[in-house]
Amino acid sequence: VSPRVSKQDIREQIWDYMEARNLADFPRPVHHRIPNFKGSYLACQNIKDLAVFARTQEVKVDPDKPLEGVRLLALQVIPFPEPEPWLLSGPPSPGGWQMCTVPHLERWCF
């Protein structure tokens, strides 16, 4: 790589390459974002086979679309704290209280 090539130049080349070869997945176009790519969800599933993931107690996952599979996997594998029942009997929030249940996880995290 030439010293005159900037990070932005490389990003532009990668974005153009992905779009030209139809490697990108929703959301499109990929320019000016961290691009999602076809197979990203399956790639995320490989994390469960890593020893470091099996013994971890917390995970930080960025909100980018390509990491959606990691967020869902982490919520399924790593213990997720549920609120104490007394917290739910207090004054309701403007939208009302909701229990922390698996059906709500997808709505809250994606």
Image: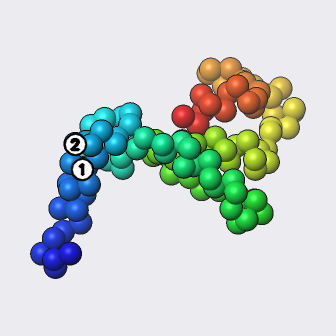
Q: Residue at x 67, y 44 (%)?
A: 73
* Relative vertical location of residue 91 with respect to residue 76 in this rendering, above or below: above
Residue 10 place in picture, x, y as percent: 22, 62
Residue 80 place in picture, x, y as percent: 76, 44
Q: Amino acid at mark 1?
A: Tyr
Numbered circle sitting on residue 41: none
Q: Residue furthest right?
A: 85
The reply to whether residue 6 is in sight is: yes
Residue 107 place in picture, x, y as percent: 60, 28
State the image quarter where residue 12 is shown.
Answer: bottom left
State the image quarter where residue 88 is shown.
Answer: top right
Residue 93 place in picture, x, y as percent: 66, 25
Q: How is the image coloured?
A: rainbow
At numbered mark 2, what does the secondary structure look like: helix, strand or loop?
helix
Q: Amino acid at mark 2?
A: Ala
Q: Residue at x 54, y 42 (%)?
A: 41
Q: Quadrant of the C terminus?
A: top right
The crowd level at tag 2 (other Cα within 10 Å; few <14, some 14-19, many 20+) is: few
Q: Residue at x 20, y 75 (%)?
A: 1
Q: Nearer the viewer, residue 40 or 31?
A: 40
In this picture, residue 102 sits left or right of residue 42: right
Q: Residue at x 30, y 39 (%)?
A: 22
Numbered circle sitting on residue 17: 1
At numbered mark 1, what does the secondary structure look like: helix, strand or loop?
helix
The residue singled out by tag 2 in the image is 20
The reply to whether residue 56 is in sight is: no
Marks 1 & 2, CB-CB < 8 Å contact: yes
Q: Residue furthest front?
A: 21
Mark 1 vs mark 2, CA separation in Å: 5 Å
In this picture, residue 46 sits left or right of residue 101: left
In this picture, residue 97 sits left or right of residue 27: right
